[in-house]
Amino acid sequence: MNRYKYRPLIWAALGMAGFTSPAIGQKQVTKQSQYWIRYYGKYKLSDDWGVNLEVEDRRYFKNNRQSNWFLPRVAVERKLGSGWAVGAGFTYYLASSPQDPEQETVVTAPELRPHQYFTSTQKLGKLGVQHRFQMEERWIHNSTSTELTSGYHFQGRARYRFQLSYPLVETKSTVGSLKAVAFDEILLNLGHNIVNNTFDQNRIYAGLNYGISKSFQAELGYMNWFQQRSSGNQYYNRDILRFTLYHTLKLY
């Protein structure tokens, strides 16, 4: 067996081990609190085809300063049957620096991010289980700590998300329904320029999803976002309150 085949997974495991080990006290961990507000539209074009649209504003609780802005994330998705689906899309992403809510934004760097994914969804009784595998090609605008500079640099990223959902209140329609949602997602940086942080970040989330109407659902949850910085010994540990408005629209 080729031992290098599983090297990214081994590095990811070591990254998580670094988070949970006592040695974390020797690392530089920055604690922050944020809130994210999202709109997620699912526009059905047919039984098998659809378009997903996402807009998201990420802000620090402290000083209400913006951290990131998705404007927007768009994907075309096709169902393959038996719970499988594939999709491809594009994100225009803005990141504000410095990543410190006590300082004013000095530079905002755009990122052009095509992505591809496939999902597998199944039911185990009432429990919904979903796996998502996603690849991202990130073209990040070059910048210094004070200004944008010419050109972009490339960085790849792989993501895997394991998600569970369980109905707490069931109704004949989605109106008044309530379900619990939880997931864990790990992200790995890819590319020759990645030296100290193949493990990028891990996100753990738990929330409640409520059916407002046939077309709209509201979800409120908590996320812990642990991210390794490019230095390899500096980390962000963020507590995040996330609100999402889901909108489903049938166009056929």
Image (cartoon, helix red, strand yellow):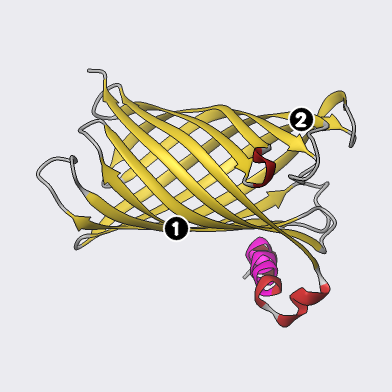
Q: Earlier in the sequence, mark 2 or mark 1?
A: 2
Question: Taken as a whole, is the magenta stretch helix, strand or loop?
Answer: helix
The residue that disc 1 covers is 183
Q: For residue 109, which numbered disc appears in the image?
A: 2
Callout 1 crowding tier (Cα within 10 Å): few <14, some 14–19, many ≥20: some
Is 159 situated left or right of 146 in this image?
left
- Work out whether residue 2 can be spotted: no
Identify whether 190 is placed above or below 143. below
Residue numbers of the magenta segment = 6-17
Image location (x, y in percent) of residue 91: 58, 29
Image location (x, y in percent) of residue 122: 28, 54
Magenta stretch: includes residue 127:
no
Is 3 situated left or right of 49 in this image?
right
Identify whether 206 is placed above or below 15. above
- Work out whether residue 122 can be spotted: yes
Identify residue type, mark 2: Ala
Identify whether 45 is placed above or below 12. above
Q: State the CA–CA distance, disc 2 to disc 1.
A: 29 Å
* Front residue (pair 19, 192): 19
Magenta stretch: includes residue 12:
yes
Q: Quadrant of the N terminus?
A: bottom right
Residue depicted at x 54% and y 42%: 36
Identify residue type, mark 1: Phe
Residue depicted at x 52% and y 56%: 223
Which residue is farthest left?
172
Callout 2 crowding tier (Cα within 10 Å): few <14, some 14–19, many ≥20: some
